[in-house]
Image (cartoon, rainbow, N blue to C red):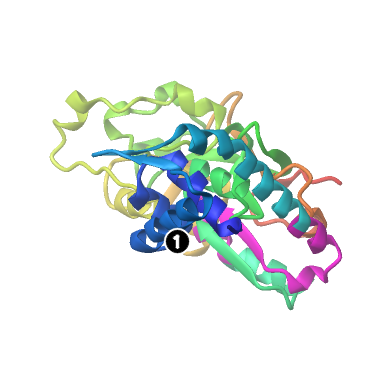
Amino acid sequence: MNFRDLEYVLAIAKHGKFSQAAVMCNVSQPALSNQIKKLEKELGVELFLRLNNEVRPTAFGQSILSIAESILSDAQKIRDSATQFRDPEAVAYRIGMTPTLAPYLTQYFSELFSDIFPRMRVTMIEDLPQNMLQMVEDHQLDMALVAQVNNSNALAFTSIWTEPLFLAMREGHPLCMLPSIAPEDVPPHDFIRLPHSFGYELEDRLPKADPAIRVAKRFDLSALRFDTICRYICHSDDCTIVSALAAEQFKRDKWPLCFVPFEGPGNLRNLGAATRPGCPRSPVLNRVGTYIQDRPPVGVTPTFSQ
């Protein structure tokens, strides 16, 4: 029996299927199944009931889940403790960003880490907030850059900056003439947005998608990528929401877009680092936060403080 065996047991219990557990553990399904059989043979008792469409823990299997979790948790604490005694640059750093942040921050963070940790290997992962937060909890990421309203209660949140929200549309659009706009005044028949939140409170006041209205349009768009929406509105009468970071990048790249700020409360999002409480990599985060405080990306207001 080893740590990997316990990880397999917990993954199977969580997903109820060998196939999904294998994906979670990054191993082939036959290899996972064979290892569980070996463990059951070693223990002399079955861990799981193999049913037609699912796998369930036996009474014995259920009884050891909390023990397995505790063992793996303690093992991780040992690894974390060892990290504090190693050269910070000798340990890779894994950071997650949302699809509405990553395209505009990859170069900035590459330069940031080159300046403050030139020998550190850094991996940046782009994913949705809820997926990244789970990856932080599962020790697959050291930090996820998310809006505070999207953060999990299980994780610590360190504020790094705030940034406003804009309504974006093509140059020459009638709305371009407005000095500002209220969320309730955004035209619902011309408004396109991503299916997930940007992290602004005023998003709840924006128009909801109305299939009856959208179906009447000659050409409609539903997209999962923010870049797809922004490229489309460059040559259409539709509009979308854009953060200050993205707006500044579009201006530098000379995209034919204009940006109208939103009125009233809720038009600022608090961006920060979601980390595990007590994570030993906090010195790295402190260095990152201090760098951003001194040299923030264009369009944001730093909020980091130690």
Q: Residue under label 1, please give it.
A: 26
- Residue 30 is situated, as x and y percent measured from the top left of the image, at 34, 61
Q: Which amino acid does label 1 sit on?
A: Asn
Seen at 36% across and 50% down, the residue is 18
Which is more toward the observer, 149 or 133?
133
Q: Is residue 119 among the parts visible in the rendering?
A: yes
Q: Residue 162: within the magenta?
A: no
Which is more toward the observer, 274 or 3?
3
Q: Is residue 97 among the parts visible in the rendering?
A: no
- Residue 203 is situated, as x and y percent measured from the top left of the image, at 48, 29
Quarter location, residue 188: top left
In the image, residue 191 above or below residue 131:
above
In the image, residue 89 above or below residue 63:
below
Tell me where the magenta segment starts and ends, as one range: 79-106
- Residue 100 is situated, as x and y percent measured from the top left of the image, at 49, 50
Quarter location, residue 111: bottom right
Seen at 46% across and 40% down, the residue is 14
